Image: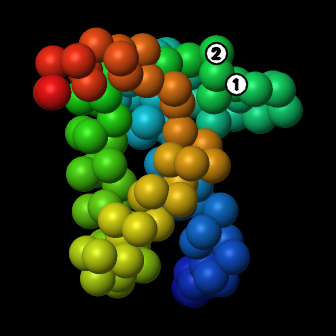
């Protein structure tokens, strides 16, 4: 019987980035995957999401990171902030959202 090899930390991180990007597109309502945007310049500016979708994605990502990497909640939230800075989609309703919340 063949034993299943465990992923290295780097492989886990690479898989997590792919999973997070794929789920971000699902939540944003785009029919796109990580493989579709691979090698595409400025793909994160081509697609958008609403602030509400962004909040939903952050919640999903926090749970995913806590489960996958056994992170505490505060650390997972911080990682999601960094993820959003590096790979997050632009918000389509940023100005409108902030006008409503003033």
Q: Position of residue 18 (x, y in %)?
A: 58, 49
Question: Could you say which disc has been placed on residue 88 in the image?
Answer: none
Between 102 and 78, the one lying in front of the other is 102
**Quadrant in which residue 49 is drawn:** top left
Q: Position of residue 57 (x, y in %)?
A: 32, 42
Judging depth in this view, the residue of 98 and 9 nearest the camera is: 98
Residue at 51 percent of width and 26 percent of height: 90
Residue furthest to the front: 102
State the residue at coordinates (64%, 22%).
45
The mark tally for this picture is 2
Q: Which quadrant would the N terminus be assigned to in this image?
A: bottom right
Q: Would you say residue 66 is visible in this rendering?
A: yes
**In this rendering, would 56 be left or right of 42?**
left
**Mark 1 crowd level (few <14, some 14–19, many ≥20, 10 Å Cα):** some
Label 2 Cα neighbours within 10 Å, binned few <14 / some 14-19 / many ≥20: few
Judging by the rendered image, the residue that carries numbered circle 1 is 43
The secondary element bearing badge 2 is classed as: helix
Residue drawn at the location 58% of the way across and 71% of the way down: 12
Compared with 89, 94 (above or below) is above
Contact, mark 2 vs mark 1 (Cβ under 8 Å): yes
Look at mark 2 in the image and give the residue it sits on: 46
User: At x 65% / y 62%, what residue is drawn?
Assistant: 14
Instruction: Give coordinates of residue 70: x percent, y percent.
Output: 35, 83
Q: Quadrant of the C terminus?
A: top left
Image height of 62 relative to 2, above or below: above
The outermost residue toward the left is 101
Q: What is the secondary structure assignment of the residue under circle 1?
A: helix
**Residue 7 location, x and y as percent?**
61, 79
The residue nearer to you, when weighing 4 against 90, is 90
Q: How is the image coloured?
A: rainbow
């Amino acid at each position: 019987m063949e034993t299943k090899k465990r992923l290295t930390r780097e492989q886990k991180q690479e898989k997590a980035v792919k999973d997070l990007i794929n789920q971000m597109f699902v939540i944003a309502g785009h029919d796109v995957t990580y493989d579709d945007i691979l090698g595409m310049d400025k793909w994160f500016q081509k697609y958008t999401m609403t602030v509400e979708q962004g909040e939903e994605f952050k919640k999903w990502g926090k749970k995913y990171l806590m489960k996958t990497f056994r992170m505490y909640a505060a650390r997972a939230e911080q990682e999601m902030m960094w993820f959003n800075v590096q790979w997050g989609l632009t918000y389509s309703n940023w100005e409108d959202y902030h006008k409503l919340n003033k």
